[in-house]
Structure formats: structure tokens, C-alpha cells
Amino acid sequence: MTDNTYKIVRFYFNDAPRTIKRGLTLEQAQEHCQRDDTRGPGWFDGYAHDTGPAKCHLDHKTQEALGFDFYRVNNSRAGGPRYVIHYLAFADSYDEAKSIANHLGFRVYRGRDFGGGFVCQSYNLENTAESIINAREAVA
């Protein structure tokens, strides 16, 4: 995302805010927030600069072997940290990548902010990255 894109954030009075739309121009974001259907009892939509998902940092050696970046996304409903990575980190074809990812505990990420990715919950991202590397080597 560039500095000129905006995201729509849904704010709740008794819950954490959630990003519901990304990649908008300032005019589109303002137009969205002025509509009557963007607020209700206990919630309203606002907009902010869109910086995209936060990139996660791994040990240099692990990052180089993996070849792809993890991105931090919203926590699970239970509060656990979740990360998304592109399917090409697992295999060249999507079907093969999905098979490997599911075996490792990843699921298809359905968020609009990241296409073609798999999501996992991890408290040790280095270990998760190494499991992907090992699974790729076992298939090869």
C-alpha cells in the first residue's frame, strides 16, 4: 500500500476496531463514511491511512531459507497471534501448497487485505517458518 491509500475502520463502542476495506482513495473513504449505512447503535465507520499488514521479521538465516515474508493479521477470537504467508512459500502450485499448509496447521486466509495466502496461529514464528522449510524439503 502507498501513502495515498486509505482504509475503512469499523469502530465499536465495546470492542476492538476492525479494518473492513482497504486500498481506497481519500475521496472514496470520505464518501463511504458519509453514507447513512456506515453507522449504527454501538458502531461507526472511520478512515485512516493504509499501511497494509505489518511485516514480521525472522532471523536472517531463516528468512533467507524461507524466501517469503510473514505478515501479522488480527488475533484469533481466543486472542492468539495470527500470521499470513503467501502460498508460494509452500509449493509452486496452489493445490500442492494448500495440502502442505493444511498438514502444518495453516488454513486459507479469506481476508481481503492479502490474496493467495495461508494463515496460522503461532507463538514461535521462527519454529513455524522452519516447519515450512522442512516440509518443502521433504516434498522435493
Image (cartoon, rainbow, N blue to C red):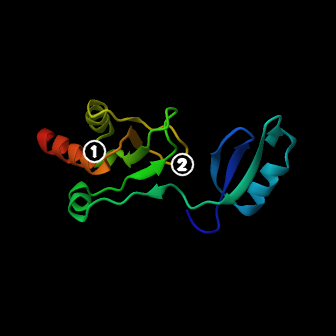
Quadrant of the image containing the N terminus: bottom right
Tag 1, which secondary structure?
helix
Q: Gap in Å between the C-alphas at discs 1 and 2?
A: 22 Å
Q: Residues within 10 Å of mark 1 (few under 14, many from 20)?
A: some
Residue at the (25%, 54%) spot, across then down: 66
Tag 2, which secondary structure?
loop
Instruction: Kindly report which numbered mark, 1 or 2, lies closer to the viewer in this rendering.
Output: 1
Task: Where is residue 19? Give x, y as percent.
Answer: 63, 47
Would you place residue 24 above or below residue 136 in this image? below
Q: Residues within 10 Å of mark 2 (few under 14, many from 20)?
A: some
Quadrant of the image containing the C terminus: top left
Q: Nearer the viewer, residue 56 or 69?
A: 56
Of the residues shown, which amino acid type is indicated by label 2? Asp
Residue at the (47%, 46%) spot, across then down: 115
Horizontal arrangement in the rendering, residue 130 relative to residue 15 (left or right): left
Task: Where is residue 65? Give x, y as percent.
Answer: 20, 57
Q: Which residue is mark 2?
A: 113
Of the residues shown, which amino acid type is indicated by label 1? Thr
Task: Where is residue 67? Give x, y as percent.
Answer: 27, 58
Which label is found at residue 128? 1
